[in-house]
Amino acid sequence: METVIFALFAALALVSAIVVVTHKSPVYSTLALVLTLFSTAVLYVLLGAPFVGALQILVYAGAIVVLFLFVIMLLNIQKEEEAHAGFGAQTWTAILGAAIFLGMMGLIFWRSGSPAAAPLTPESVALKPLAAQLFTTYLLPFEIVGLLLLVAVIGATVAARKPGEELGHIGEHEYVSGEEPRTDPLKSGSDPHQPSVAEPAYSSQREAS
Amino acid sequence: MSSVPVSWYLLLAAALFAIGTIGALTRRNGISIFLSIELMLNAANLTLVAYARQLDDRTGQLIVFFVMAVAAAEAAVGLALFIAVFRQRHTIDVNRMNLMRW
Amino acid sequence: MSPELIAILAKYAVMFAVLINVAPIMNWVERRACAYIQDRPGPNRVGPLGLFQPVADALKFMFKEDVTPSAADKPLYLMAPALALLPAFTTFVVIPFGPDITVAGRAVRLMVADVDTGVLVFLALSSLSVYSLVMAGYASNNKFSLLGSIRASAQLISYELALTIAVLAVIIPVGSFNLADVVAYQRAHVWNFLPQIIGFLVFLIASFAETNRLPFDLPEAESELVAGFHTEYGSMRFALFFQAEYTNMAALSALGVTLYFGGWSLPWIEFPHNLLGGVLGLLTLLAKIGICMAVFVWIRWTFPRFRYDQLMRLGWKVLLPLAILNLILVAAMTLAGWL
Amino acid sequence: MLDLLWLIPILPLAGAAINGLLGRRFPKSLVTAVGVGAPLASLVLALGCLWEYAQGSFPNDAFERTLYAWTAGDLSIPVGFLLDRLSSVMLFVVTFVGFWIHVYSVGYMGHEEGYRRYFSYLNLFMSAMLLLILGNNFLVMFVGWEGVGLCSYLLIGFYYDQPVPPAAGKKAFIVNRIGDFAFLVGLFALFAKFGTLTYGQIFPRIAAQPGLVLGEYVPGFTLAAFVALCFFVGAMGKSAQIPLYVWLPDAMAGPTPVSALIHAATMVTAGVYMVVRSNVLYQLAPGVSMFVAVIGATTAIFAATIALAQTDIKKVLAYSTVSQLGYMFLAAGLGAYSAALFHVVTHAFFKALLFLGSGSVIHAMGGEQDMRKMGGLGKHLPQTSKLFWIGCLAIAGIPPLSGFFSKDEILHAAAADHHWVLYLVGWITAVLTAFYMFRAHYMTFAGRFRGTHDQEHHLHESPPSMTLPLWVLAVGAAVAGVVGVPKLLSFGLISNWFHHWLEPVIAQPQGLEAGEHSIGVGLEVGLVLLAVAAGVGGLFLARSVYGGDRGFARELTWAQRFPFLHRLLENKYYVDEIYDALIVRPLAALSRFLWKVVDTFVIDGAVKAGAFLTELTGDVGRFSTTGNVRNYALYFFLGVILLFWWIAFA
């Protein structure tokens, strides 16, 4: 029974991974990624790590990939002409390299055999020891990760800021407040050949305040 | 309860990693490269959990949390950068971002 | 088919039956309540007191022409409604609906999936609901729906955060993610909503946002975006969205009730550990869910819609801090031994 | 007076410095005053010192004064001056002849434009020569030796704007350097053995223990032989003997007084002085002495034959100098050091006289030196021709002039040692010398004038400032012989005063039997008559060929009869051409090879190769930086695989 589940979700994961890599439209690849994440979450549960699995869906699939989708829509990224940059040297070497890598890993895992893993006991799956370990031996990394996330948030907001914000006004002459120069390509009409995107909510909020 | 030998999981993870790498190296679109990288990270997580299971040591799972956190941070900053690049050059096609070319 | 499997399937059958009927009932209740609030009679033509109005609606959905926008992204367009149902029908498994009963000599726990990480699974699955909205908005190739889906995803992500932290606050005194333990804790102590009133309020508001109910139904606000992300959806597909919405509401209120109002337990009454007890537990739970749903409907027809920036500010600058405050208070109280 | 001995070389040096550095603004008269005054002062000072030296008696007949010792670590070189029997003779000759040549130069160089420079160089030469002969050790002598070489280079190349003189100067300097190299090697060997170079410390010790220098030093040579040979090669370079004489004839490119002073009277005799100074070594190295004698003889006859066919009057005198120097080395080689030095003294007088005579002829002819364009100058330059005639008589060895006595002394020495071959060579050279000197006299002063018309009409006798030195030197040439008259000819009155004067300087090393043994009186008289016959024979032979106004007619007929011989002599046995072919051209070729192949190709090539390599790697490397993110990612990944393989499998 359990091997069936493994086989099913492993295959699902592989197929969706391939779709992520090969599909032309970024939205499809993103959704395929969600599927892959979901199937790996199931595999985590199979490997006796339900907490990680749940967390994976909650954090990874639930938030990060949504962010991707969000950005894809924000930038209105069109479907690429062709998925790959043509089968140039770059692609072939990449595939060859990946194949070699896979070969090596396979060789190692095959050589190291597969000792039977200890049967899962309820307490081996329990959360309490995991949490205990997290907040004792790994407290420092935990704090550091917290800091990292803070920095990431700040970095992201600064990087994605609309040009001309605090960097002093841009353009030749002073603008009457409210009559913003339409340099932001995200605004409609600024880029003829690029179809405009509906004005995102958050920018209107900026104008108001 | 898992009768499936752990090495299968490892092989799966390796395959996912390989696919992710191919994606990262071949795609022209910035976001797709990012997705492939997330895929590779995920493969790494799977390996970690698999070994945690085999060595019966929960540390593997702990590390997965940190990997996820880092992945989140990376995604956030990366996407912000892409937005900034898009603003300036109306494209996130990696081939056309070769300002550093000699 | 091992006995456990049978038990699980049986319990799921019961749950499914309940959930399937939620949408029609709520349809009727919604229409009547709205009419009552707006001082008008509401549906009373179809059957006594309009009781057959839901049936009429269902029939209407079935016979409506199934229109698909030409440039729509076919696969995504079709998958979106189906995906909407996924969180709705799967999150219910972790909610216990009765005491442990012994049936045919076997002890059975009245919850579909007796899983240690119950609450987390609930939250994880509910976070997947975002994708259906996004898919729908993107696939229908319509400016309004795209805008609606972007707004929806932004809203869901923000409020999901507050919701998670509020729920975590409840878990701290209990010490386990399993909802059965939460209910057991509440039977031993007072219901959670009293000590964690702040947490409860945050949870309530966040759940409104999670299900796009009126104060937060900006994504499919009729006046501005026609129908938001499901503008292009016709008959049955719209029915699916409709169904998913109400089921989601039910699931969330079930969680709320379990966390803050003692789930299937009544304060001083001890249910017998047999089939009767199970039924009584289930009925109690359904009653509480009903009350909660009524509140949803009541709130819907009383509050005006939030503007998007107010929505965002509320989410990030009000709810989140409150939730964190609540978390800290609860932690402190637990350490102090009051809870 | 003797305490001021060190001042003698310093005075001309000061004269040279004043003229050289400050003279630019001096009027010509002041330059002349300084230029001639300095040698005059040193002459007066020298005579005073000589007088005082002759009176007083000094420990082992030498007055030595060390001014200053230059020390470096354990090496200490004393800078001192020595006046003994040998250096006194040289001092007199150098200062006396030098002064009169300075006087002559005033007239001769009067209208030359490099007047000031000429006198400062000449004074510098005088100080260097005096330093050479007054030095009390070999090193000071060597300083003088190089100084003289330098001044000869400067003076030969005096007319630097013309092409020939600078080349001649360079040639002289280089050939001298070859000789100096050998001289240095000898000095090193000596210093290595004795740790000092002062005469006073070396020669008495060698004389006392000859064994010191008789040990085997270099295979085939004892130390004495080796040092003697090295010194002689140095002397050959400086005094123009067979292999290294080629520079002297070319040195005639310089002004005539220079030739007179440097290339006749003083510098060329420095070699003889050095050989006589270190006679102890030559006595202990009989083989080398015989070698010196043979070289001297061959040079004598070889140069004499070349002089026969020369048409340039100064070239004739130059080859005659080489030949006479050959005579001196013949005498030194045979052990007759006093005879060699006596010939130096007499030669200084009559050769200076002849050169200055030819100078006044050239002066009168407006720079013309080719005898074929002269003739019949006797009437126009009466004094010069008469004095030139006295010079010719002296050099030909016609008694009673000085030439006869010194040359006879040398032939006597050869005969005494029974070296009849050398005696025959010497006698033949005497005949040739007489012949070519009188040939030169008749061609210039006798017969019809063969020059151009305007040369003829402004022929004039030289001014007194030029004829006076001629007269003085003529008296010297005539009288100098008295000093060394042998006992026989002076009918027992004075027995060779000069020989006795030099007695203390000629050391008698232990274990060597006494000097030359005497020969029967009859043989001696015969030899004297033979010598006179040689001189007179040469005279009449020349008169018969060139007398009257036949000029060169007879010579041309002789030339047709022996065309090959005549062309050979005229072209100086093609020695210069041989040297050029054997040494100069190969050396040039070698240096060109080194320049072209080794320097440009090998060394520059290596540097260029380095540069090329770096550029190459730069070019190759350039392609890896495509600026494309995806390429970099690929490289990164390939690196990872490599690393992984290395860790996992290697």
Image: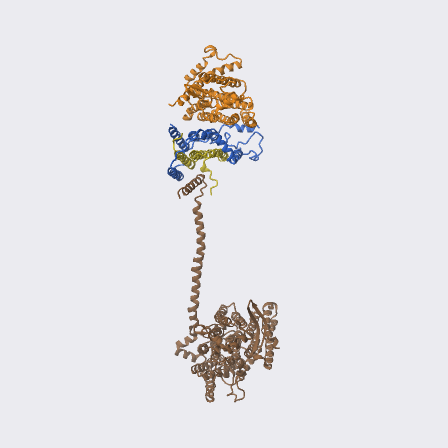
Chain colours: A blue, B yellow, C orange, D brown
Taking C329 as reference, is D179 left or right? left
Vertical arrangement, residue D638 with respect to residue D243, above or below: above
Taking D631 as reference, is D481 left or right? right
Vertical arrangement, residue A89 with respect to residue D139, above or below: above
Q: Can residue C311 be seen in the rendering of this structure?
A: yes
Give the residue drawn at x 48%, y 12%. Answer: C43
Q: Give how far across and how far down residue A194 sits, in percent.
A: 47, 31
Vertical arrangement, residue D293 with respect to residue D642, above or below: below
Quarter of the picture holding the N terminus of chain D: bottom right
Q: Give how far across and how far down residue B87 sits, in percent.
A: 50, 34
Q: Can residue D35 be seen in the rendering of this structure?
A: no
Between residue C273 and residue D155, name the one nearer to us: C273
Between residue A33 and residue A53, name the one nearer to us: A53
Q: Give how far across and how far down residue D598 sits, in percent.
A: 43, 60
Give the residue drawn at x 52%, y 68%. Answer: D160
Vertical arrangement, residue A191 with respect to residue D583, above or below: above
Quarter of the picture holding the C terminus of chain D: top left
Res. C73 image quadrant: top left
- Number of marks in the rendered image: 0
